[in-house]
Image (tube, grey):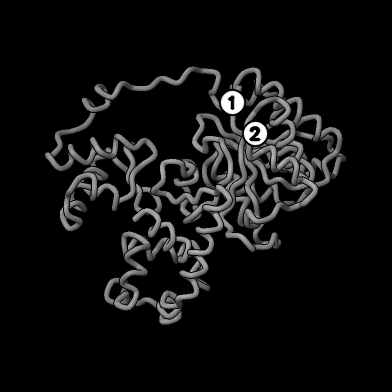
C-alpha cells in the first residue's frame, strides 16, 4: 500500500497544470492519491467540478509508467522516496502548505534533527563571506555539535557552507534543483559525494530533470521549510538568497543576516533585510544560539501530565489520541484508520472533536498530530 501511495503521489506531480495546490486539493477531497488513480474513471462522482483536462491526464498510462521507472531508478541507486506519511519526511517542511508531495533523498542524516539551520547567500562570495561561513560553523560546532546545515550546493556561499560543515564535522544537506541522476554544478561533484556519507542530497525533482532557472526558485522553499532558521551570508540587492529569506519569513521561521560594509554591493541585500526588519542582525554563533533560545535545555512535559491536561474524551477519542501520540511527527489518515480499526465514515467525527478541543491539528496531506 505504501509503495502504491508513493507511486500515485509521484504521478500527481506529473499532471500538467495541476501544481502543488491543485494536487493537495485533490488529496484533501479524496483522502489519498491511491483513491484518485484507482477510481479515476469515476472521479467526477468523488470530486465534482473536476476539469476534463485533469481527469483525462489522470487516465494517461504513460504517467504511471514513468513513475514506476522512477521508483526503479531510486531502488537501484539507494534513493529513498519520502511522502508526508513517512516518519523520515522532514517534519518542519510538512507544516508548510506547499510542501512537496514526494521527496527523493540520498544520504545518512536525520532530516528531523533537533537543530536545523539553512545558510544561503550570493554566488559571488568574497573572502569576507567565505570566512564568515567557516568561523560561524566552527563556533557552532563547539556548542551545538548535532546541528544539521542546509544549503543549495550552488557556487559561492552555498558551497562554502557545505564545505565548512564537513570540515568541522557537522552533517549537511544540499537541496537540489534537478534530479539525483546528476550534480550541478559538476565542479561540486566531489563535495556532493562526501555529503552523501555525512549528510545527504534531497530534491523534489525526478531524474532527468534539468537544472532550469525556475527549479532553483522552487527549491528555495524547501531550504527554508526544512529549517528552524535561515541565515543569509552576503547578498546583492537581488538574488535567490533573498527569495529564501522571504519564504522563511512567510513560514514564520527565524531569519538572520550578517551585515556588511555600507558600500559593499555584495552585502546590500543583507543590509536591506536588517534595515527592513526582515532579518535579525547577526554577528556570531553565540548571538544566534541565544536568539534561538538554544542555550537553554528543553523541558519535555511528561506524558502522564500531558494526558491530565486533556478534557474528558469518548472511548474513540481516547483511542485516537493514544495512537496519534505514538507518532511524534504525525500520522496519515489512512494509517490511522488501519491502526484504530475505526471505519472511515465513523472516524471523522472524533477527529473533528479532538481538533475543536485543541488536542490535535491537521497538517498538509491529511496528517494528524498532537498539539
Residue at label 1? 291
Image quarter where the C terminus lies is top left
User: What's the mark number on residue 280?
Assistant: 2
Q: Residue at x 28, y 71 (%)?
A: 46
**Residue 311 sits in quarter:** top left
Residue at the far front in the pictured view? 76
Q: Residues within 10 Å of mark 2 (few under 14, many from 20)?
A: many
Q: Nearer the viewer, residue 312 or 133?
A: 133
If you read the primary sequence from the N terminus, does the residue marked by circle 2 or circle 1 appear first? 2
Q: Residues within 10 Å of mark 1 (few under 14, many from 20)?
A: some
43 vs 17, left or right, is left
Give residue 186's position: percent from left, percent from top.
Answer: 77, 51
Instruction: Look at the numbered disc 1 and give the secondary structure of its residue.
Output: helix
Query: Does 125 sit above or below residue 214?
Result: above
Give residue 307's position: percent from left, percent from top.
Answer: 23, 27
**Residue 141 sits in quarter:** top right
Q: Residue at x 62, y 18 (%)?
A: 143
Query: Does 24 sit above or below residue 18?
Result: above
Q: Is residue 271 visible?
A: no
Q: Residue at x 65, y 18 (%)?
A: 142
Number of numbered labels in the structure image: 2
342 vs 200, left or right, is left
Give residue 23's position: percent from left, percent from top.
Answer: 44, 64
Amino acid at each position: 500500500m505504501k509503495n502504491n501511495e508513493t507511486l500515485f503521489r509521484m504521478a500527481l506531480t506529473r499532471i500538467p497544470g495541476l501544481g502543488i495546490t491543485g494536487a493537495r486539493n485533490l488529496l484533501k477531497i479524496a483522502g489519498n492519491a491511491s483513491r484518485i488513480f484507482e477510481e479515476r474513471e469515476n472521479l467526477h462522482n468523488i470530486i465534482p467540478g473536476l476539469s476534463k483536462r485533469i481527469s483525462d491526464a489522470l487516465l494517461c498510462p504513460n504517467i504511471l509508467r514513468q513513475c514506476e521507472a522512477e521508483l526503479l531508478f531510486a531502488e537501484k541507486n539507494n534513493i529513498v522516496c519520502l511522502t508526508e506519511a513517512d516518519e523520515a519526511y522532514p517534519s518542519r517542511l510538512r507544516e508548510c502548505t506547499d510542501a512537496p508531495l514526494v521527496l527523493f533523498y540520498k544520504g545518512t542524516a536525520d532530516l528531523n534533527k533537533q537543530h536545523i539551520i539553512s545558510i544561503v547567500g550570493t554566488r559571488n562570495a568574497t573572502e569576507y563571506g567565505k570566512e564568515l561561513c567557516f568561523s560561524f560553523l566552527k563556533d557552532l560546532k563547539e556548542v551545538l555539535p548535532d546541528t544539521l546545515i542546509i544549503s543549495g550546493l550552488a557556487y559561492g556561499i552555498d558551497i562554502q557552507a557545505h564545505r565548512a560543515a564537513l570540515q568541522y564535522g557537522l552533517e549537511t544537506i544540499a537541496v537540489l534543483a534537478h534530479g539525483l541522476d546528476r550534480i550541478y554544478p559538476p565542479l561540486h561533484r566531489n563535495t556532493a559525494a562526501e555529503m552523501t556519507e555525512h549528510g545527504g542530497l534531497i530534491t523534489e525533482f525526478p531524474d532527468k530533470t534539468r537544472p532550469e532557472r525556475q527549479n532553483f526558485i522552487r527549491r528555495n522553499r524547501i531550504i527554508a521549510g526544512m529549517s528552524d532558521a535561515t541565515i543569509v551570508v552576503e547578498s546583492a540587492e537581488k538574488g535567490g538568497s533573498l527569495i529564501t529569506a522571504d519564504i522563511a519569513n512567510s513560514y514564520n521561521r527565524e531569519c538572520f543576516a550578517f551585515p556588511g560594509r555600507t558600500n559593499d554591493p555584495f552585502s546590500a541585500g543583507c543590509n536591506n533585510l536588517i534595515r527592513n526588519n526582515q532579518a535579525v542582525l547577526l554577528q556570531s554563533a553565540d548571538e544566534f544560539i541565544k536568539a534561538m533560545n538554544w542555550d537553554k535545555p528543553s523541558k519535555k512535559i511528561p506524558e502522564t501530565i500531558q494526558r491530565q491536561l486533556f478534557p474528558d474524551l469518548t472511548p474513540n477519542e481516547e483511542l485516537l489520541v493514544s495512537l496519534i501520540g505514538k507518532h511524534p511527527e504525525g500520522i496519515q489518515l489512512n494509517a490511522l484508520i488501519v491502526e484504530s480499526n475505526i471505519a472511515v465514515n465513523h472516524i471523522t467525527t472524533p477527529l473533528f472533536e479532538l481538533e475543536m478541543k485543541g488536542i490535535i491539528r491537521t497538517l498538509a496531506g491529511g496528517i494528524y498530530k498532537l498539539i
